[in-house]
Image (tube, rainbow, N blue to C red):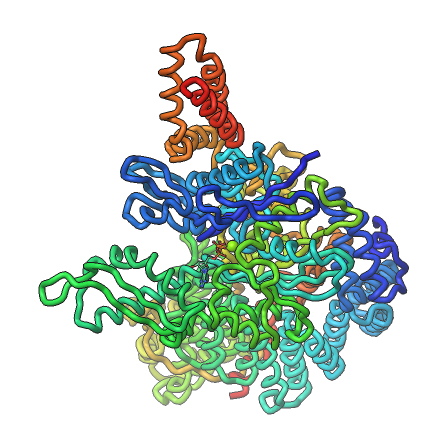
Amino acid sequence: MAKFSIGMDLGTSTSEVAVYRNDRYEALLDPRTQSAIVPSLVAVSAAGELLVGQEALSRVDQPGFGVREVKRLMGTDATVSLRGETYRPEEVSALILRKLKHVAEVSLGESVSDVVITVPANFPDQAKAATHNAAQIAGLNALRLINEPTAAAMAFGVKNLEREEQLVVFDFGGGTLDVTTLEMVSGIMDVKSSFGDTKLGGKDFDDRMIDLILRKFHATGARTDHLSDVRRELKAFAESAKKDLSTRREAEISVARFGQKGGEMVNLEVRITREEYEDEIASLLDRARTVLKTALQSGKLRPSSIGRILLVGGTTYIPAVRDLVSEAFGKPGSTEIHPDLAVAYGASVQAAIIQDLISSETGLIVADIAPIGIGIDIMSDVGGQRMLMYEPLLMPNQKIPVMVERDYSLMSADQRELEIEILQDPTGKAKLATDAVKTDIIGRITDIPPNQSGNPHPLKVAFSYDLNGMIRLRAWIPGLDKSLDIGVAATASRMSDEQKAQASDRIDEIWKSSPYSRQFESLIRKGERLVGEKGDEAKPISESLIELKSALAEGNESRIETAGGMLADAIFDLEG
Amino acid sequence: MAASLYEMLGVTPDASPAEIKRAYYNLIRKHPPEKEPERYRLINEAWSVLSNEESRRSYDETSLYGDEVEALMDAARRAEEEENWATAVQKLKMALALTPTADYILNRLALVYAYDNRFPEAVKSLEKLTTRVPTVPVYWSNLGEIFLRQADWQSENGQEKEKTPSLEKGRAAFETAYRLEPYNQKHLLGVSRCYKAEKNYPQAIAYARRAITADGEVDYSDFDTLFEIAFLHVLTDDWDGLQKVVGEINSVTPSDPEIRGYVASRFARLASELFGAGGYSDAARIGIHALTFQDASARAELEKMVTFYRYVAGANEEMGAFSGDQRLPVPLRYFAYLSYMKAVDEPLEDHDDEFQEAWTNFLRGDGDHRLALLILRMEYPHLYWLQDNVYDKLAEQLKLDLRQGPDPMGDGFRPLNMAEDSAPQRTITKPPVAKPPVARPVTGPTLRESRATLPNNLTRPPNQGLALPFAGGVLGFFMGAVFATPLGGAGVVITGIIGAWIGVSLGKWLRRIVGG
Ligand SMILES: Nc1ncnc2c1ncn2[C@@H]1O[C@H](COP(=O)(O)OP(=O)(O)OP(=O)(O)O)[C@@H](O)[C@H]1O
Ligand SMILES: [Mg+2]
């Protein structure tokens, strides 16, 4: 049995890793920064070093040298470029996960492989598949992908097993807003509903800040060119001004030689008050209010019946956001579980449940849901017209796992091929296929022999949605050897094993150029020199060299750490 | 059936909601998702049905009385087939007593009431249903259908239907169905039919037009609606409008000769009905449109029919001047008149004798036979044609060459640019002489085949519908059953429904023309 369990929150803006052991969870700290919060940033230094997390901050906004918010690209075909090389979003995410693995291994002094990773409740299927692949590429075994808000609630639940109440998780992060309703009964977290806006997050609040700064700057008569570069340059300043305003009434932004005025370079010096900023973000707050209202409706809950609102995610630090929560519920949101760490905590709790560190007889149990409805398109007779309709297989907020089998038929006896696409229905209201959201997960059956009986062939469809939120759909014509098998859990996992292995090697290669790996390079070079010079006398050095190299090759951070220490000691002993 | 949902949760069917809830949480603790995902899944399926008051009640009803209800529904179905409405009503009411929340049974009951012309009861049932579940479009459209039928029935029984407010209510019901299902053209057609029944043809046309585009495209599957619009244009004597619609029909009709033959036959049948109602020139015009669609191989018969309509239409027009034409001897006028009546199939007593007598009287009478024949040939070519072999023989005897006379086919009827023409009005009650070609079944529109599957609701086992954890699932199954039994005939295909409806209302419309 495992001694500890690891959970990872792979966020849009920040990522965290937590451990569950000895009946409690705790966040693990980046050994360099001594902070639990690892910015989700990847950059390459001028010298070609890989920088992940805090150390990437100074480079990340240089075009072509850094990547921010890669989570928003997960599951898409977009690529990003780093120092002239293109990467898939999976690979960049893998580097962040690799960093978290490193943080965990260094802090725990043990190698880490089995982890639970969180994903937004409304993450598209492909994005979940991409996350799964990213874990594999990073050398991790994803025990489970779970919904972020559910995880946050678990961090609360595991500490409050006796409590019986309705609660809401208000998770407002860097990229998404998710509102989840749950009921706690005798140690069981019963998730009722989850509703969100996948395109509303701290990033949008940064954009508004950038607008405001630029407007004020231009009002002084100064000019700027290349708007996209200018905005990119301002991003870090804007984000820190935004954070300042969460605790102060006024923020100051100054950037040297930012624009021109009268043919001369001028500095940007702008002051922004909290009131000005709140005016600027009014429409974002409105959207958040709408999400909150819809979420309560879909959970069939009245605000007054809610016992507790857990605030999760960095954007909930904004006072106006806190205000809108208190207004909606008539009581303030709670920060008793650290808003930045709750999700990672909960992920470690889920890992502990899976790895039996938490007893199923007495410990926390979670009954989770699928927030988005899933179905397929079928041709149907509507008022004498054949129409492509949405056929639900899973309703939004249905408990998972799910398995259904349905009977259909082809349209005619001589139909030669058919096509099925998996569709999503976030609201549960789709009727026509066009009301639903396409996933591009499509399967076909071709070369169907005509049915001699003159009737159309029957068609069976089996659909499942597992605890990871992975879908699988099979369809077959009974009696014929004709079938299809699609879904993230089946063929459409986006990357082949070979592609994943390649990506994994590539990530290993880049990882070796991280300062952490490089810090051993000079040590190794020195050790090798000493072995050459002193021969047998340097035997302890050559032994620890072998150990260090194999640890480096394996990528096992804690072994690297230990072997590195041994080597340093051996060199010290010989020279000292 | 597998273990009941109650057994799955380990409670009795009379368990209180609190007991069920407690049992559910205890079971989850005993069979957590991590350890027993399959058991856990089944527990949740049971819970999702039993935790909701409504779905629990409908599950209770179905599982307790499922077999009895099924038997009653079977009995009701048999009674319906025998048109034994009273028995059907009784069986359905018994089924409803067992499962009062089974919407599909109440819907069925309303339809049976309607078949039995018990409209107030039918309306009451459906109003109850649409109040209880206002989001099911088919209940609204059935309500609309019932108002339509009621109006029909009232007018057949001497009450003027355009004065009854039920058509307005019918329109409102169809409009609601349309709001719920904006892509279903049937609802817009329902509104159109109400307007038609109210003799508000422009609105009827407008709604039928909207129906065509309800699914986003105009194609051959819209043929029935286009044909209906064509018919509405005939009703309003809007020949330009008709022309345009025929053009549209032409452009959506595929080149498959069988399909074109079917379209031709629909026009031909309409033409023959118009002819039978005394609308000779209308029949000729529509007949010409039928020709547009008929391919060469099967054209001859249809052409013969259209030619006949055109002669009769021409003759009908000539009749007015002809009967008062003093230049012609009375016996000849009478003979030509009889020939005309025979052509339009007016019942004639002892007509053979009368023909003979009139002709003999003409031949015996004095006056210039040559001149009379000449006038007949030159000025009344259509009337001449109706008995041309008799006249021709006489002309030959009189050494009269009439070949240079006007072409009776030069009557201005053209498929795509017809001259203005006033419709003749005469009292005729019998069907026409010429028989239209027999309608052939449509081979069906070609559809995108790779978009595959048609739901097979009827073959989906009912158990599955019930086992679905969501009320939506259960409803979906029942709705499938409802769709399969639309009001207005056993046919599922709309062709059948419209066909029947034209059949019914045509009679009345004919009376309108005929009655002047
Ligand atoms: N004190 C603060 N005031 C305002 N905003 C803050 C503050 N601290 C962090 N944020 C913002 O919160 C966001 C990051 O929140 P968080 O780390 O919870 O998101 P994430 O987990 O990365 O994103 P997601 O969960 O949407 O993928 C960033 O936009 C950041 O600027
Ligand atoms: Mg987050």
Farthest residue toward the left? A263
Above or below, comparing residue B384 to residue A127 in the picture: below
Decide if residue A294 is on the left or right side of residue B360.
Answer: right
Tell me what residue is drawn at x 43 percent, y 54 percent: B254
Above or below, comparing residue B66 to residue A468 in the picture: below
Decide if residue B139 is on the left or right side of residue A208.
Answer: right
In the foreground, B478 or A549: A549
In the foreground, B287 or A45: A45
Decide if residue A133 is on the left or right side of residue A167.
Answer: left
Above or below, comparing residue B229 to residue A459 in the picture: below
Using the rendered view, name the quadrant where residue B251 is placed: bottom left
Tell me what residue is drawn at x 35 percent, y 66 percent: A209
Farthest residue toward the front? A576
Q: Is residue A397 visible?
A: yes
Decide if residue B324 is on the left or right side of residue A232.
Answer: right
Residue A241 position, x and y percent, is 36, 64
Q: Is residue B302 visible?
A: no
Above or below, comparing residue B114 to residue A468 in the picture: below
Residue A468 position, x and y percent, is 61, 45
Residue B39 position, x and y percent, is 78, 46
In the foreground, B120 or A139: A139
Residue A457 position, x and y percent, is 63, 42
Using the rendered view, name the quadrant where residue A514 is placed: top left
Farthest residue toward the top? A536
Q: Total number of numbered labels?
A: 0
